[in-house]
Amino acid sequence: MSLAPGIYFLSGNYAVAEGAIMAGCRFFAGYPITPSSELAERMARRLPQVGGIFVQMEDEIASIVTIIGASWGGLKAMTATSGPGFSLMQENIGLAVMMETPIVIVDVQRAGPSTGMPTYIGQGDVMQAKWGSHGQYEIIALSPSTVQECFDLTIRAFNLAERYRVPVIVLMDERLSHLYEKVRVPSPDEIVIIERKRPRSRENFLPFMPDEDLVPPMPPVGEGFRIHATGLTHDERGYPHMDPEVQERLVRRLCDKIRKHADEIIDVDTYAMDDAELAIVTFGSVARPAIRAVKLARENGIKLGLIKLRTIWPFPEKLIEEYATNGVKAFIVAEINYGQIYHVVREAVAGNAKVHLLPKMGGAIHTPDEILDEVVMVKRNAR
């Protein structure tokens, strides 16, 4: 069974596993990789207890292909990995986008590039989550900053995957995956679970004919529907169709079903932004010292606020633009890389405010004092 309602002491990896089970995940395929291995171990123990299936695959490529197949078989499916494995999955993330397959991919980021520092924190997979596969597409990526959010946002990841028929990525980081905190597990009637939209009839059924929301219903294989799914450009029947007009119609819809629902998808937490003249933009574990930095700044008369990204993709560009044109004079982007979200914030600001990067290369997290020192310097230079 899913965890009974109550308070538990869980790591981030365990909280993701329990959130997935609560959301209805009943299939996990994966390959061990630090720092996500404990998540797979938890699923290996827990899935058989709820009637689910765990499979350890030979590598990350096989893992994602297998969960794509499980999803088409009617199961909510997930895999988990870290940077090197996430790189291996990219081609088939593109396949899942093209076949409109709802899956959840948990990427516990570590310091890179390459093998890097497997047991230390990184946040270098942000752009890979958005642009890792080739071609034009849209995807959803969520970023927890507490163990409670690991649980909550994993449930949301499955809901979004089913709602929009799209791969959803949970971008964790090493520090959070191994951190233990209290997690409140609510009762089932407090949790909204979105189930897959099924076709209303087999008559004249077209597997890729969208409803008005641009999302087609999805039948499971084996229930009598005629289904053809391919990574090639295809028409509404799912048949390959090498026609520029068909490509235009298909790819535009794959993008627009996310873009046109961005306001429903985007989830941002703000702190002390009502009168902020300076703002930190951050996500994941860095949000924790950033909150402390805001409190210290406020105690010293600096009007500093915080924008914490729980949804990274699609990016909340309209919100950033609104703050940039309504009082925020400078943004400080704190991230454990050499500037990934920084560039997106600069685009959203569109010259209406200054944007400063406060990077770390991986292995360590920002301290509140480091963030505050940057804030003081930015404020001083703005005079």
Image: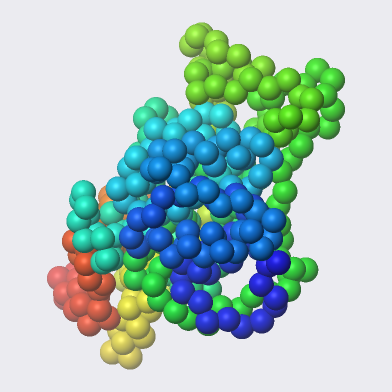
State the quadrant of the C terminus. Answer: bottom left
- Please give the count of numbered marks on the rendered protein: 0
Quarter of image, res 68: top right
Residue placed at 83% from the left, 32% from the top?
200
Where residue 203 sits: x, y (%)? Answer: 84, 20
Identify whether 61 is placed above or below 294: above
Seen as rendered, the residue at the extreme bottom is 299
Q: Is residue 130 at least partly visible in the picture?
A: no
**Closer-to-camera residue (171/298):** 171
Identify whether 274 is placed above or below 44: below
Residue placed at 63% from the left, 48% from the top?
76
Q: Is residue 124 left or right of residue 360?
A: right
Identify whether 136 is placed above or below 184: above
Q: Is residue 208 at least partly visible in the picture?
A: yes
Quarter of image, res 209: top right
Where residue 100 sits: x, y (%)? Answer: 58, 33
**Closer-to-camera residue (131/214):** 131
State the quadrant of the N terminus. Answer: bottom right
Where residue 5 sits: x, y (%)? Answer: 70, 77
Residue placed at 50% from the left, 69% from the top?
14
**Closer-to-camera residue (108/369):** 108
Name the colouring of the figure: rainbow
**Closer-to-camera residue (345/231):** 231
Where residue 250 sits: x, y (%)? Answer: 55, 22
Residue placed at 53% from the left, 73% from the top?
148
